Image (cartoon, rainbow, N blue to C red):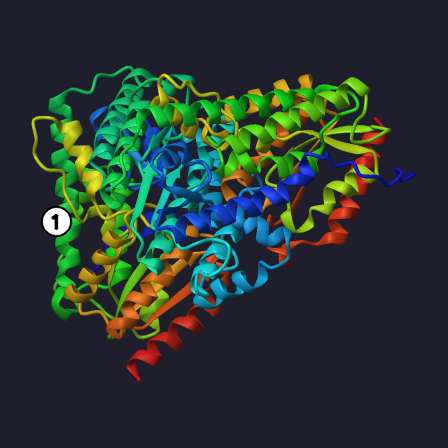
Amino acid sequence: MSLQRKKSRVLQTTKKIGELIMAYFSQTSDAKAQGKPVAWVTVFTPVELLYAMDVYPIAPEHFGAMCSARGFILDYLQEAEREGYSQNLCSYSRCSLGYVLSGTSGLMPPPDILVTFRNSCDVYVKWWQSLHMHLGTPLFVGETPYVLTSEDLDNYVLDYVVKQLEQLVEMAEEKFGSRLDMEKLADIVRLSDKASELWLETLKLRRFRPCPLGGRDSASDIFPLVVMQGTTEAVEFYEELLEEVKQKVNMGEGVLENERFRLLFDGIWLWHAFDLIKYFEDRGAVFVYEPYSDAWAYRLDASKPLESIARKILAMGLNVDIDIRTERFSESIEEFQIDGAVLFSNRSCKTWSTPQLVTADILNKNFNVPYLLFEADMADPRQYAEAQIKNRIDAFLEVLGER
Amino acid sequence: MKIPIGIRDLCENPTEILNRYEDSGVKVIGFTCSYVPEELIISAGLQPYRITNIGANTSALTPSFVCPFASATLENIIKHEDFFSGFIVAHTCDPMWRLYDILKKKIGKPLFLLRVPHNTDNELSLDFFRMELMRFKKFLEKNFETRIDHSALFSSIELCNESRDLLKSIYVLNSGGEYKINAFDRFHLVLASMWMPKPEINTQIKALNFNNGETYGDVRLHLNGTAIYDLVLLKTIEESGGFAASDDLCTGSRYFWSNVEKSEDPISALSNRYLKRTPCPSHAPLEQRLEYINFMIEEFKVQGVLTFAEGFCDPILYDSVHIRNMLAKKGIPTMVIDYENPAQEIGRIKTRVEAFIESISG
């Protein structure tokens, strides 16, 4: 197999992400220094609501991904393991627990409140309880029940989540003395909706051949939607990104000059082995769709902010019934003209990995999409057998080449 | 006390009773967890049966790093599907939740996911859980062409309360430092109560004499964990000089410790009982669980706490750190024993249990 010519395949806008992340952390630290409250949140938590109350959200999951990508996660993992947290537990959680146990000094300012809604996984509850036990910081645990049918987004399930959002507001008002300004919330919801709209429009452009935005772009560009929903910075970033991607489509430019295979990636990216995406690209394979990238965007209605936010945190990717999830898969296969699927069986993310073999079976039998399933960890580099995985990738691409 | 031979056999081979149900035309509903109110199943004229991991290997449908207990439970459901009329899975931890996803694609029998809110101390969760129980009731009525009326529900609540009272009355014989009934025997009765018709097991328990209990060791232990069906673990403790005086297991005291209160609204009463009981390790608040463990330690004069952790069981692996930290302040030693298949690992488990007990007894 001939390797493709080396050149920058990453978008210019994507290259600005690092700066945006550092500005975000620095802004949160500044806010903390000014006496404003900081919330540590799980990623599908209503950050719009927190911003509207002048509470600054920080996502330890994102911190874990960043520490892993930048190669300084091991100290934190080992600190948590010394305390007794098993290596079999989520590496994001071990990272933030290690951060707390080693003194909570660094990019994440200490929290004034811990907020989680159980949606993408049940580990959130245990992880946030553990942070609460070590830090003694007030804890809010919300429940967003598994969405079994679309009716759940309008019935007693929705009411339950809306009322919990109201409880969160009450708790924040009581603890921090701030009031929820509904007009401000509506503005923030409008911005959050705009960022989602722009991101979804951008992702749709990946249907073009050659694909204008690859896995490295989508993995990085997701960041503003993780913790900056409702900010002007996020909207400006996605406007610029969309403009650049549109230009690439107009010019017929893609990530690869010679696009051989268009792939679906199922899972969280391997932050410590980010170059694995490049390994695929070097062999003519480009990622054109990931449920992970879709999961963060949700259209909101500013005239019904709490209901909208409740629907959003209910309907995030992993919290909807398997039939709804596989329907999204099937639509994407046609829309993005997918040749094969790469499924990452992530030791840290049991909620994602447990039904993955069943999903793979559906992909294969119902849609005739070949798949590669490999096991590793999203953030812990010690659980990654590079040579073995690359061998399997080579074999998989050979199979695709013979079809 | 001598456990009746029928109960001993049942605990060795829990699926044997399914043949009896099939022969007598009894419709059986398999359920996975003690958050599922058996009262509703019984009031629909159906027989509840708790699905276990006994007799099954881990399923090839799940990754190797997922809780082996959940995986083997999945395997048993698929293997024995024909014996059942339907299945109820409760959303407790990630693997159990995802079992529902897999089963939806792999079995043909009616399947219900009971969504158990994780923030059990929230009054809103109580209302939500009540709605879930209403949905559960409708599921049973629709799939099994029956009507569950208040009178049937009141009767089944009374029956299950009697069962819980009996199990608790045996359990508390060990309180205050007594050595009346060993865990091996005690667990036989609890497990049989999850598999046999309640009137039958209740009658058998009433006929037992608890004042001549055979005990092995004298170091009093509390067992922490999720569910234990493999009684060889309990035998190992006792043969190593330990006496498992108390526990917070789903197949132990959490199953029967509190009763459903009398109420004109039985569904609310069920919601209240099941959600307000001591939470599963997968649920919040942790403080309530720690309080329960503390209570057990005081009540049963416990000298050490053994945590049995199924490999990859996230809730227990997080909690064990906090339980250790809490108990260290009280001078109570703890040990975590993790395993994937107790029968295959019993030698290693026994060595660790013996070392723990020796460290306590000096």
Q: Position of residue A128 (x, y in %)?
A: 38, 49
The single residue placed furthest to the bottom in the displayed view is: B362
The residue shown at (91%, 39%) is A1
Check the image and report above or below for B35 versus B308. Answer: above
Q: Disc 1 residue type?
A: Lys
Looking at the image, which is closer to me, B222 or A396?
A396
Question: What x and y, as percent, mark residue B101?
Answer: 48, 31
Q: Residue furthest front?
A: A34
Q: Residue at x 42, y 42 (%)?
A: A57
Counting from the top left corner in percent of width and height, residue B287 is at: 25, 54
- Which residue is pictured at 45% across the width and 50% down the height? A30
Q: Work out whether residue B234 or residue B139 is closer to the camera in this orientation and state it.
A: B139
Q: Is residue A18 left or right of residue A32?
A: right
In the rendered image, the vertical position of residue A83 relative to residue B62, given as above or below: below
Q: Is residue A368 visible?
A: no
Residue position for label 1 = B206
* Relative to A178, residue A74 above or below: below
Q: Is residue A172 left or right of residue B100?
A: left
Residue A282 visible in this rendered orientation of the protein: yes
